[in-house]
């Protein structure tokens, strides 16, 4: 017997719960498949367009599978600087232990201790590398 993949919907998550039952399951994939195959209208028309591209296609099914397998995607923020648009991924801060517990033993990485608590504030990081076009835009250098 196979395992059932299911995720509860966070309050702000949207789009993947086609059936509106508060979970992302194979039923959501089936609903999109039925919309594509037989033009099923059981759910609101906008519910089937999971990825929000204006079309109901296999890409919507893939988006649901991605959420089921990998969890909900990170929240992102889009910015435009001097006509160049880029995306930043919002990263939640947290606390963790960092360091090498064997730092005094003379082993490799001896200088990576002692173990200590580190707290990192929430931050945003670029979704992709900075392109030359973006660098020129940020630096206000004409291309």
Image (spheres, helix red, strand yellow):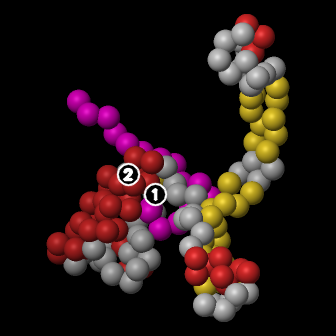
Q: Quadrant of the N terminus?
A: top left
Q: Within 10 Å of the Cα at label 2, are there few (<14), some (14-19), or many (20+) other Cα atoms?
A: many
Residue 98 has which mark?
none
Residue 11 x, y percent position in the rendering: 62, 58
Question: Could you tell me which secondary element the residue under label 2 belongs to?
Answer: loop
Q: Where does the magenta region start and end?
A: 1-17
Do the residues bearing badges 2 and 1 touch, measured as CB atoms within 8 Å? yes
Question: Could you tell me which secondary element the residue under label 1 belongs to?
Answer: loop
Q: How many marks?
A: 2
- The one nearer the camera, 25 or 72, is 72
- The one nearer the camera, 70 or 114, is 114
Q: Relative to residue 142, is residue 2 drawn left or right?
A: left
**Residue 15 sits above or below residue 79 on the image:** above
Residue 104 x, y percent position in the rendering: 78, 10
**Residue 29 sits above or below residue 77 on the image:** above
Outermost residue toward the top? 105
Q: Relative to residue 14, is residue 4 drawn left or right?
A: left
Q: Circle 1 sits on which residue? A: 21
**Residue 118 sits above or below residue 47 on the image:** above
Q: Is residue 135 visible?
A: yes
Residue 115, magenta (yes or no): no
Q: Quadrant of the C terminus?
A: bottom right
Q: Residue at x 62, y 78 (%)?
A: 134
Rendering quarter of residue 16: bottom left
Q: Residue at x 66, y 92 (%)?
A: 142
Residue 15, magenta (yes or no): yes
Q: Residue at x 40, y 47 (%)?
A: 69
Q: Within 10 Å of the Cα at label 1, are there few (<14), some (14-19), or many (20+) other Cα atoms?
A: few
Q: Residue at x 73, y 81 (%)?
A: 139
**Residue 7 sits above or below residue 73 on the image:** above
Dominant secondary structure of the magenta stretch?
A: loop
């Amino acid at each position: 017997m196979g395992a059932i993949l299911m995720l509860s919907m966070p309050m702000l998550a949207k789009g993947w719960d086609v059936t509106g039952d508060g979970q992302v399951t194979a039923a959501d994939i089936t609903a999109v498949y039925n919309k594509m195959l037989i033009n099923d209208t059981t759910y609101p028309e906008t519910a089937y367009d999971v990825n929000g591209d204006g079309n109901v296609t296999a890409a919507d099914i893939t988006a649901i599978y991605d959420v089921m397998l990998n969890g909900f995607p990170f929240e992102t923020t889009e910015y435009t600087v001097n006509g160049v648009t880029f995306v930043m991924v919002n990263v939640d801060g947290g606390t963790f232990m960092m360091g090498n517990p064997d730092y005094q033993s003379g082993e490799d990485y001896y200088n990576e201790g002692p173990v200590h608590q580190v707290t990192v504030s929430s931050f945003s990081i670029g979704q992709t590398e900075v392109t030359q076009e973006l660098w020129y835009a940020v630096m206000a250098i004409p291309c």
